Amino acid sequence: MSDLKETLDEKRKLVDQKATQYRTTRDEWNNRTKEHTAIRNELNAEVRELIQNVRQQREIREQMNELVREKKSIRAEANKKVKAAKSMLDSERSEKEDRTPQQGRRRERKVTIHSLRRDLQKLEREFERGAHTGNNEKKVMKRMKEISSKIKEMKATEDSNGDLKEARGMLREAMAEQEAAHAEVQSAAQAAQEAHDLMLQWNKEVDRQREHAEEAHRELRKSKKEADKAHHFYIVSLRCLHSIQDMLRAMRGATSGEGQRGARVEVQDLMSKLMSGDTLSTEELMELQRLD
């Protein structure tokens, strides 16, 4: 009997050690679960904030796109005004030319202040590049002076003509309005593009943080599963430990009686297995607990 008691004491110590080990493992996994839960919740909060930023940039983009459409409409009206002003100016100049006596039957190329300025700028560029040297240089300089003089003369003539002056003023105003409208279109379009680019950046950040949150959630589920498994083994170990303790108490203070003879026989059978070095299953240990 003493050998049996010694064997049970050894088994009790082993089960107690296992129970302590499972409890420690369970607590460690529970701590990891808490850590992963906190990380996941924090990442999910960041994802929600990032999604709000994405929505905000999308709204800004849509507002800017709507503004672009409005400014394009304004620019289109300004373009019409410029076209009308140019048509009016050309008409006034044509009437003036028609009143001017024409020499010869051949109609020469129409000369305007704009065309003269274009010719003058071309000669100035050639002169700066050194394309004209020697006697040709003097000819070019003379030609440049003639063009400048012609421009001044034509401007003075147009200024003296009320209708032409009015047409030129309308053209300047229309072109200024056109330029301002075009600048506003470009500004709104740039703002819309910037909002779109920022929205895409936030979207990428949302995907990145969401992946981290999902990884934290996977780790959470893993740690919770391991904690539950360790807890289950811990509970089984406790039950086994209690059963062995009940067996030891039964050996110390068993009483006689028909109601306990069958249970005692079954307990002795299981104890015999322990004595022979066999390992009892969880079900057998739990049966011991029920029998006691």
Image (spheres, grey):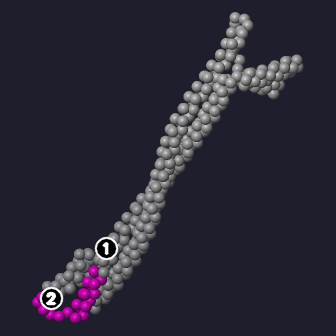
Residue 280 in the image: above or below residue 131: below
Residue 191 in the image: above or below residue 151: below
Residue 119 in the image: above or below residue 68: above
Q: Is residue 18 left or right of residue 164?
A: left
Q: Main secondary structure of the magenta part?
A: helix
Q: Position of residue 286 (x, y in %)?
A: 24, 79
Residue type at numbered disc 1: His
Residue 164 marker:
none
Q: Image point 29% across, 86% down: which residue?
A: 8
Q: Position of residue 112 (x, y in %)?
A: 70, 20
Q: Mark 1: few, some, or many residues within 10 Å (few <14, many ≥20)?
A: some
Is residue 167 shown to the viewer in this render? Answer: yes
Residue lying furthest right: 134
Q: Image point 13% across, 92% down: which residue?
A: 257
Residue lying furthest top: 105
Residue lying furthest left: 258
Q: Secondary structure at mark 2?
A: helix
The magenta span reads 239-261
Per the image, is 240 magenta?
yes
In terms of depth relative to the viewer, which is nearer, 237 or 148?
A: 148
Q: Secondary structure at mark 1?
A: helix
Residue 120 in the image: above or below residue 281: above
**Residue 287 appears in which quarter of the rendering?**
bottom left
Q: Is residue 27 left or right of residue 156?
A: left
Residue to which mark 1 is pinned: 232
